[in-house]
Image (spheres, grey):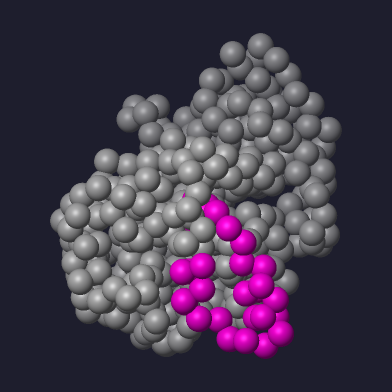
Amino acid sequence: MSVLVTSIGELMTQDAEGGVLRDAALVLEGERISWIGPAGRAPAADEAYDAGGRAGLPGWVDSHTHLVFAGDRTAEFEARMAGEAYAAGGIAVTVEATRAAGDYDLTRLLLARVAEAAAGGTTYLETKTGYGLDVAQEARGARIAAGVVDEVTFLGAHLVPAAEDAEDYTDLVCGPMLDAVRPYVRWADVFCETGAFTPDQSRRVLAACAAAGLGLRVHGNQLGPGAGVALAVAFGAASVDHVNHLSDDDVDALAGTWSGTDADDAPGTVATCLPACDLSTRQPFAPARRLLDAGARIALASNCNPGTSYTSSMAFCVATAVLQMGLTVHEAVRAATYGGALALRRHTGRDADGLRAVGSLAVGHRADLQLLNAPSATHLAYRPGMPLVHAVWRAGVRVR
């Protein structure tokens, strides 16, 4: 079945040209976009939907979340707001609660969180393991996630459990744990940070996961200067996430992974900024403006998790990036759509290979679209916090 969405006042395509169309329309045919252009030239379709002059843009691509968890860390949040510093060890509270929860409850909680994200316009979602931290629990988390979300990342190297030897645990992550999760995951990640994994341990994890055929991501440079960016670049990781504390060499290294302007043919390492987390942990914002000006590519993601960023609102992240991080609305929207797709290597792909691109609107791309109760995307930052999502289609199916 085909659906013509017409009378779109402003359509931010975020395609290769990053175009903005006025009085636009597009046709959703099955799970793909089959036509896009001026509303006055739109072809017939089985159904028509009048956008009434509303703004349209791709569904959000949230490339960094931690959604498979149970329990509550409100007390930790209150303590941090009262002045306590954030440290990596709070993860252990969630690990205990997640291990104690049954499969049914974890799945129910995950489904509810994904539904919340979809209601806010998110149509493509990554999530990580990392709240199990033993072989059986990490495999369980990966299996549950694989049945619900679009992309699953192995994060056994999230924290060394209490009473475990760090070197022995790193061996476990690189061996039996990796083998157990491998059928369910496409990516691997490591928390390279003081209080988590050292650069040498992180290097071992990345090498083992790359040898197993997984794409790589890195949690890096969040709590202070560190080796995360350098490791991500050295291993050709798809992204390095957080990036709050960057030296000039870090910025230059990230920019240097991009050849010319053709990101499609030779994608480098995306710097994923997590502004909701930066607010909650009271870290300095990631230097998104500096990264873009240097020629690096950025993504915005929610980092939805129970300890440091319990929100899946990508609109909130976009508004924060505009109001606090020096991005234009167009740059922030692009980072939250195309940028996230680039970080997940889902920015290309058409009918021929069956892997349709997400994060942008073009013929052959996946039919992921959101309409706002506003005439332009500028209202995302102009009216921060307002419930602006009017309608959402994911792979051609209306989900809101």
Q: Residue at x 58, y 62 (%)?
A: 306
The quarter in which the C terminus is drawn is top right
Q: Residue at x 33, y 30 (%)?
A: 353
Q: Nearer the viewer, residue 98 or 318?
A: 98
The quarter in which the N terminus is drawn is top right
The quadrant holding residue 323 is bottom right
* x and y, in percent, of residue 165 in the image: 25, 76
Left or right of 283 in this view: 24:
right
* x and y, in percent, of residue 159 in the image: 38, 70
Question: Can you see residue 382?
Answer: yes
Left or right of 354 in this view: 291:
right
Q: Residue at x 48, y 53 (%)?
A: 100
* x and y, in percent, of residue 6 in the image: 73, 28
Does residue 77 show up magenta in the picture? yes
* x and y, in percent, of residue 365 in the image: 49, 34
Classify 4 as above or below 317. above
Q: Nearer the viewer, residue 35 or 68?
A: 68
Q: Residue at x 67, y 80 (%)?
A: 79
**How many numbered marks have been drawn onto this rendered protein structure?**
0
The magenta span reads 65-93
Classify 243 as above or below 158. below
Question: Can you see residue 325?
Answer: no
Left or right of 167 in this view: 392:
right
